[in-house]
Amino acid sequence: MRNQTRIGISSLIFNLNEALKICEENNEINHIEIGIDNISDCEELKKYKEQIKRLNLSVGIHLPMELNPCEDIEFIKQKWIEYIVIISENLNFLDISYYNMHLGYAITNRLKKNKEKYLNNIVDFFEKLSMKEKRLSITIENTYTKGGDVCNVGSDVEDFIYILDHNKNISFCYDSGHDLISSSNYLSLKNKTKVVHLSDNNGIEDEHLGIFNGKLKENNLQNILLLNPQFIVLEVKFDYIEDSLHSLKKNYHE
């Protein structure tokens, strides 16, 4: 595998102990992405500080899915920004490589009528966040939507082109599982891609299956690897990690 790309797994606080055991048993894993939902999770994470350092793991943080950068209510938007700043301050005992987040959600009819307004809300969100906390490295992740009264923003590459054009210091996180459900030409964002989330599914549900256990094909993986990200995160159930690592190594050409 390329020396500059770190290979990781994903974890939440409740199963972090198990995840770190997997990292300890496999020296090819040198990165971990940890989901933080509550400020209290930061204190819990402190318990693993020495173990993370001993294993020489770089750390990414996945911010909560409830976070809504396209929020239209200014008061609530400011609270989300304040939340991220507090999380960052509480995690200063670790060298965090990036903070990853989704673009949020909106009432479907309103989004269809004025999508640019919600994209501008996101641009404004990141501008205000950078004014509060300049040193944060932010990655934004493609997601999927299935209709309904509320839908996710960020299920089309054009959303990211717009935001990344306005917020130059933000990077892209490509999620293969989400792309299988709501496909778009995300591989065109190669120059902005910092993180890749690798998982597989049936094209309908975000199942977090191992590589090649769903619709993902070998040529898809090879094209994803051409993105040459700094971090590849196996965002799969723990039982699939060993086989997914094997598939990754087999297709990772110098």
Image (cartoon, grey):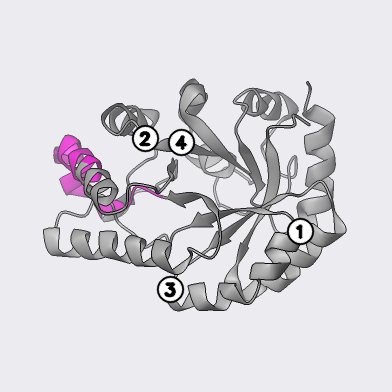
Q: Earlier in the sequence, mark 1 or mark 4?
A: 1
Per the image, label 4 sits on a secondary structure element best described as: strand
Left or right: where 69 falls relative to 227: left
Residue type marked 3:
Asn
> How packed is label 2: few (under 14 Cα within 10 Å), some, or many (20 or more)?
some
Which tag, 4 or 3, sits closer to the chain's start?
3
Residue type highlighted by circle 1: Leu
**250 over 27 or under it: above or below:** above
Which amino acid type is shown beneath numbered disc 2? Asn
As displayed, is residue 77 above or below residue 219?
A: below
Image coordinates for residue 7, horizontal then vertical, percent: 71, 43
- Which circle's residue, 2 or 3, is located before the other in the chain? 3
Q: Which residue is mark 1?
A: 55
Q: Nearer the viewer, mark 1 or mark 3?
A: 1
Looking at the image, which is closer to me, 47 or 187? 47
CA gap, disc 4 and disc 3: 24 Å
- SS assignment for the magenta stretch, majority: helix
Asked which secondary structure carries label 1, the reply is loop
Verify CB contact (< 8 Å) between mark 2 and mark 1: no
Image quarter (top left, top right, bottom left or bottom right) of the C terminus: top right
Q: Residue at x 65, y 41 (%)?
A: 232
